[in-house]
Amino acid sequence: MHPSRASAVLCLLALAAGWPARATAEDRQPVRATAKARMDSGLRLYEAHQFAAAAAEFEATYALDPHRDVLYVWAQALRLGGQCAKALPLYQQFLDAAPPRAEAERARANLTRCRAELAAAPAPPPAASTVTVPAANAADHPPDPSQAPTPPAGSLVAVPAAPPPDTGLTTTPSPSRPPRPLDTVDRLLLGGGALALAASGGFYLSARAERDDAQRATTYTQVEQHADAARSRDRLAWGALAVGVGVIAAAVIRLVWK
């Protein structure tokens, strides 16, 4: 059995057995005999997990004998039956009656649990109110054009927008400008740039060949000659590369902006 249910059942058993309440500023006698039948019925329903019916019996018990401990089991039955909103004031009323410390701690724990359940529950959607207006019989009341309804002062009336004036001009999307064909200057620039890049590659390969010859040379003079030739062709390769890149860039800029 759940601890909170067990504590409620023990509390009811104490009342049914005739145990007096613990000594407090307001000592109470056990539940009166006139209310004991309703209390026993509520206890049986509570143990059978019929919490709504048990809560009704505990409410009747409290009406016959407003015993402090009945408040706690009444609130327990309401909470376990899904009626935390009704259980909250009963827990608080039980705490206001200054119960013993252990019982007060259990009541506070269940009070906190109830508040958390209520806070986590989704808010119900607002009910939509509909008004049904009976339709008038057209045969009995023919429409009168002279008595058209007048909108109240200050209300906004939707007016259909007027069509745009016909100017006689047909708007067509402007065609995209076709790409400009290459002229003589463009061809010269692109061709010259390509030739310069090709020359750069040739000079680079020639410089590598001179370095290879320098490594195979057998005299110092031959090594120096091949090394000088390799450095010279390296400079020519880099110069041709710069010229080729510059000429091709100029051709591209001319094609884009002209």
Image (cartoon, helix red, strand yellow):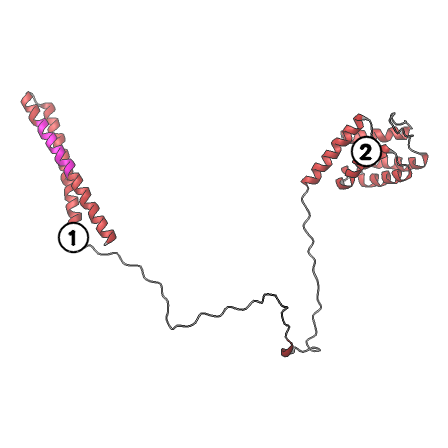
Looking at the image, which residue is at 84% across and 29% down? 11
Residue span colored magenta:
226-239
Looking at the image, which residue is at 63% across and 72% down? 150
Q: Amino acid at mark 2?
A: Asp
Name the residue nearer the viewer: 231 or 151.
151
Where disc 2 sits, the SS reads helix
The CA span between labels 1 and 2 is: 102 Å
Looking at the image, which residue is at 15% across and 34% down? 204
Q: Quadrant of the C terminus?
A: bottom left
Q: Amino acid at mark 1?
A: Val
In the picture, measured across the screen, residue 99 lies left or right of residue 133, that is: right
Residue 229 image point, x, y percent: 9, 30
Q: Quadrant of residue 224?
A: top left
Looking at the image, which residue is at 86% across and 39% down? 57
Q: Which mark is residue 103?
A: none
What secondary structure prevails in the magenta region?
helix
In the picture, measured across the screen, residue 52 lies left or right of residue 132, that is: right
Name the residue nearer the viewer: 9 or 65.
65
Question: What residue would you read off at disc 2?
Answer: 96
Task: Give above or below for 149 relative to 207.
Answer: below
Name the residue nearer the viewer: 257 or 3.
257
Q: Tell me, yes or no, whether the highlighted magenta stretch contains residue 231.
A: yes
Residue 82 is at least partly visible in this image: no
Question: What residue would you read off at disc 1?
Answer: 185
Furthest-top residue in view?
A: 219
Q: Tell me, yes or no, whether the highlighted magenta stretch contains residue 244.
A: no
Residue 193 image point, x, y percent: 17, 45
